[in-house]
Image (cartoon, grey):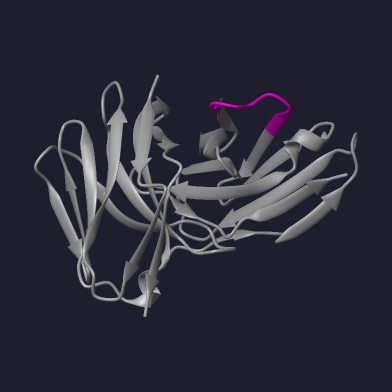
Amino acid sequence: DVKVTQSSRYLVKRTGEKVFLECVQDMDHENMFWYRQDPGLGLRLIYFSYDVKMKEKGDIPEGYSVSREKKERFSLILESASTNQTSMYLCASSLPGPQHFGDGTRLSIL
Amino acid sequence: EDQVTQSPEALRLQEGESSSLNCSYTVSGLRGLFWYRQDPGKGPEFLFTLYSAGEEKEKERLKATLTKKESFLHITAPKPEDSATYLCAVARYSGGGADGLTFGKGTHLIIQP
């Protein structure tokens, strides 16, 4: 079974802080993705990566960046956290085909 | 712009009462339609992929079907453990061989004993 692990289940940070969310997958998948999930808005794609050091913007990249230095690890970075970035963040990985998700990080920005 | 609309938003059924969830989509160049199940506090769990109109997939009490404009998730004789939010998503080519997903807002299904 595919395992996608997100380093924190819950995280509380302050506005203006630089925040790192980490994701690791154990299935040698090429593609990795970051989504956020908000009530009434559903899941929305922030960034994705199709290879080490390669990244592409998704639908809502503003205020975020990503890093993929190793194939199994994909990091989401909030450069200067703001309260409107309070959300559930979900990481996923795939070969070409279905994406497999981690259990999410619930991030609160105070 | 890709759009995915799921209906109903919420559905309450009695145990054993069969029903269907709807997913309507508009996408330029469908590269797959996906169904996921999400339990509270968990990430989405993959159920099915459908690629072309007329395709059907089954797993236990669930059956997914696809037409050119919509997909249905049929639930036959559901049990309380089928209670969850069911998400529909369409894949679009996004770059480098990766397909970003556009999700609907989900159907919250409750099965009462």
Please give the name of the residue rendered at 71% of the width and 31% of the height, measured from the top-left corner. A64
Asked which quadrant contains residue B86, the reply is bottom left
> In the image, which residues are magenta?
A57-65
Which secondary structure class fits the magenta region best?
loop
User: Is A90 on the left or on the right of B4, as rendered?
Assistant: right
Please give the name of the residue rendered at 56% of the width and 30% of the height, measured from the top-left corner. A54
Marks counted in the figure total 0
Q: Nearer the viewer, residue B46 or A84?
A: A84
**Residue A13 screen position, x and y as percent:** 87, 47
Q: Nearer the viewer, residue B17 or B46?
A: B17
B77 vs B24: above or below: below
**Residue A73 screen position, x and y as percent:** 61, 50
Please give the name of the residue rendered at 59% of the width and 63% of the height, measured from the top-left corner. B41
Q: Find the residue positioned furthest to the left.
A: B54
B21 vs B69: above or below: below
**Residue B101 screen position, x and y as percent:** 42, 37
User: Is A47 on the left or on the right of B4, as rendered?
Assistant: right
Q: State the quadrant of the N terminus of chain B.
A: top left
Q: Nearer the viewer, residue B107 or B113?
A: B113
Asked which quadrant contains residue A61, the reply is top right
User: Is A49 on the left or on the right of B67, as rendered?
Assistant: right
Residue A60 is a magenta residue: yes
User: Is A42 on the left or on the right of B60, as rendered?
Assistant: right
Please give the name of the residue rendered at 47% of the width and 56% of the height, measured from the top-left corner. B44
